[in-house]
Amino acid sequence: MSVADFNPTEYEAEAAERWGNTAAYAESAPRTAAYTKADWERIGAEAAEISNGLAALMEAEVAPDSESEMQLAERHRRHISEWFYECPPQMHAALGEMYVADPRFSANFDKAGEGLAAYLSAAITANRRKVGDG
């Protein structure tokens, strides 16, 4: 799916059911509802830049716990915090696990490189050890 094809409401009902009672959802829902098409394009472009950087490091066989990889994992975490909800390292680690456990997330990340979801998950875990639970 390209950024132009992104429909932010596609998983809205599922998100409300799974996370509707969380502080992150309470923060994210009004923020994302106010975003314009230009905002979504910017969000998508930033996410693609992060994913492409991760994929390049993975292809170059850079270890997920390397400094460059953890910097991109941290950038991924900050991207979530900036655009969606405050994402402390512990929450980010849980997201990394979900990226591997849920085939929809894996497939989305793996579009940038086969195995990227697992690679990012490992980098998120390493980054959490480095920065703590925030």
Image (cartoon, helix red, strand yellow):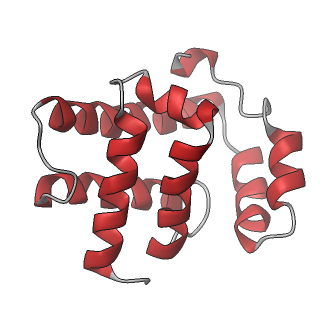
Q: Position of residue 124 (x, y in %)?
A: 36, 60
Q: Quadrant of residue 19?
A: bottom right
Q: Nearer the viewer, residue 41 or 74?
A: 74
Quadrant housing the C terminus: bottom left
Task: Look at the picture and state if 107 lies above or below 80.
Answer: above
Write the residue at 66% across / 35% down: 36
Write the residue at 89% across / 52% down: 17
Write the residue at 35% across / 72% down: 128
79 relative to 103 in the view: left or right: left
The outermost residue toward the front is 101
Q: Position of residue 83 (x, y in %)?
A: 55, 53
Q: Position of residue 68 (x, y in %)?
A: 13, 53
39 relative to 134 in the view: left or right: right
Write the residue at 86% across / 61% down: 20
Q: Is residue 75 visible?
A: no
Q: Is residue 133 visible?
A: yes
Q: Quadrant of residue 38?
A: top right
